[in-house]
Structure formats: C-alpha cells, structure tokens
Amino acid sequence: MPREVEILLYGIFRTRLGRDYIRLSIERAEPLSAIISSIPELKRLVEELDREGVPYGILVDGRNVMLASGLDTVVEPGSKVKLFTYVSGGSLETVWDAYQRYRGDIERAIKSFREVGRCGEERIFLELVFCLLTPMSPAIRCWEKVKELHLSGTLYSGGPGDIGRVIRGCRFWRKKSQYIVGARRLYMEGRLGEILSIEDPLMAREMLVRSVKGLGYKEASHFLRNIGRGLHLAILDRHILRWMARLRLINSYPKSLSRRRYIELETRFRWLARYLGMLPAELDLLLWAMETGVVFK
C-alpha cells in the first residue's frame, strides 16, 4: 500500500526551490536517486549542485548517508529524508575573521608566487625539489634543505647518497633523494620546461604526475601554485583536509585519496573559495596559517 515519503529542505535547497518540504507516495522501497529523479525541479537542482561542487548532506530517517551510499540509499515507504547544505555556522565565520588578520601576508605570498614563475627554470626547479621534500615533513625545514642543496652545488652534481646526507631529517629522505635525482634529469633534459609550456594548469598537473616520480596530485598542485601557475588548484594536505572536515565539506578525514576522490574534494574546496570570495590558493594559505600560525609556501 502506498505511503508518503517526506523530503525536508534546508539551506540552498529551501532557498532555490522556495519550499520547506516535498511529499510523494511510493508503494515499495526505492533508491533515493529514483525518488529525486521523479521530482524534476529537485533533480535539476541536485545536478546543478553536483556540477558546482556545492557540498550537501543527506539524512534518511536520521542516518547521515552522504559520501557513504548517498543517492543509492534505499528509502522505505513512510521514510523522512532531509537535504541540507553546510554554508553557515561558527567555523565559517572563524575562517572569515582569520582572513582579515592574514590578508596582507596572503596577498604578498600570492605576489611572490607569480614572481617566481617569471624567473628562470633553475629557480622554478628549486620549487619542484621543495615540493618533493614536503610530504610528511615541516615545510620551513624543507626549504632550508633546498637552499643548502642549491648553495653547496649538491643538487646539480650529487648522487642520491650525497643528496640524502643533506636532506636527512626529512621523512623518507632515502626515497626523496632518488626522486630529486629523477626530477633533476627531467630539468636538465629540458622536459620540465616542455611540461610547463602547457597553458592549462589541469593538463600540466596531469603531465607532472605522470613524469615526476614522487609527485602526486597534492605535490604537483603545490608546485604549480608556488610558481603562480596553479592558483585555482587545491593542495589537499592534512591541514586542509582537517579543516574541510571541520567545515563539514567532508564527513571525515580521508586516509588516502585516489585521483577521482582528489578531484571530487578539490571541486568542493574550489566552491568554498568562490563562496568566500577568494582564490583557492588564498584559502589554502589561510587554512594553513590557521593551523600553523604562519603564512608560508
């Protein structure tokens, strides 16, 4: 026998549809996606939010199903569904207040990234080495190691053992010394310059990930940001992911990120930056500063 399903609307769902709820009758259990597809105005809005990367939550009979089974969740006749967005609350206000404090430092950092991008390939290569060193290691210490490698000449002529002795103290220094030698070969052969001649930052990132061992999407985004080429990319490191969880852009801190998951979360991060009126690079620097107390590359 048919029973009503009540869909309660909050946030953007309520604002854009101009309604507080939608009710419809179903005879048997159906996936939430099928129910939403039967309501054209709601289907269009969900598709639009997905395209824009707007984070939204789903409760089915009190169970939060976002990112777990989501729209594939089975809804029973008589169920209550809640659709809502996360774009308000104290955490967001905290971020905005912090932006006012750090704004000058952030603007100077963005300017310096653009200036680095206009320097020669050697200076750009130093940023690549820096981004190879930073995973699981303090950024300031990594930059000191890069400068030591550069000034001693070890970066250009040393083998993995020589480089390893300098960067000892960074986590995984043995592997990273091998990665640096591989990146140096790419730089010396001119292939790094060829990759950076690609105008589209997303395509350039893909090529970097394929060509530079030790460089994942996070590190490649970091490198492109630091040379002024990736200001619209997201650097999803542990600091940023913690903040995304606090702001409820994600349900929990992910242990690992596949390419597909990285791009999905990057879309959400970019949406939040637009919502706050910032470049993704500015928001990244801000959240990093809120975690560490300093604005640093």
Image (cartoon, rainbow, N blue to C red):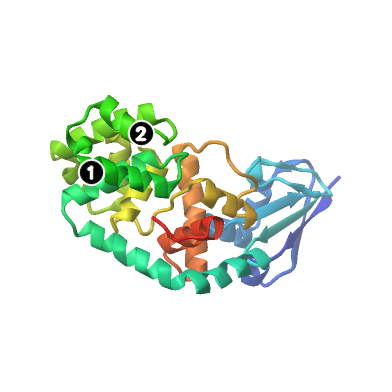
Q: Which image quarter: residue 22?
A: bottom right
Taking the view exactly as shown, the residue that stands out farthest to the left is 189
* Residue 100 image position (x, y, % from top left): 51, 74
Q: Nearer the viewer, residue 124 or 90?
A: 124
Secondary element at image label 2: loop
Q: Taking the image as drawn, is residue 138 in sight?
A: yes
Q: Which residue corresponds to the image point at 64% horizontal and 69% vertical from the top-left? A: 17
> Residue 210: which quarter of the image?
top left
- The amino acid marked with disc number 1 is His
Packing grade of label 2 (10 A; few <14, some 14-19, many >=20) is: many
Q: Is residue 19 above or below residue 240?
A: below
x, y percent for residue 121: 17, 49
In the picture, measured across the screen, residue 16 lies left or right of residue 110, that is: right
| Residue occupied by mark 1 | 150
The foreground one among 23 and 8 is: 8
Q: CA distance from mark 2 to mark 1?
A: 20 Å
Q: Secondary structure at mark 1?
A: helix
User: Which label number is shown at residue 214?
Assistant: 2
Where is residue 161? Give x, y as percent: 28, 25
Does residue 176 appear to the left or right of 117 in the view shown?
A: right
Q: Mark 1: few, some, or many residues within 10 Å (few <14, many ≥20)? A: some
Q: Residue at x 32, y 30 (%)?
A: 165
The answer to whether residue 38 is visible is no
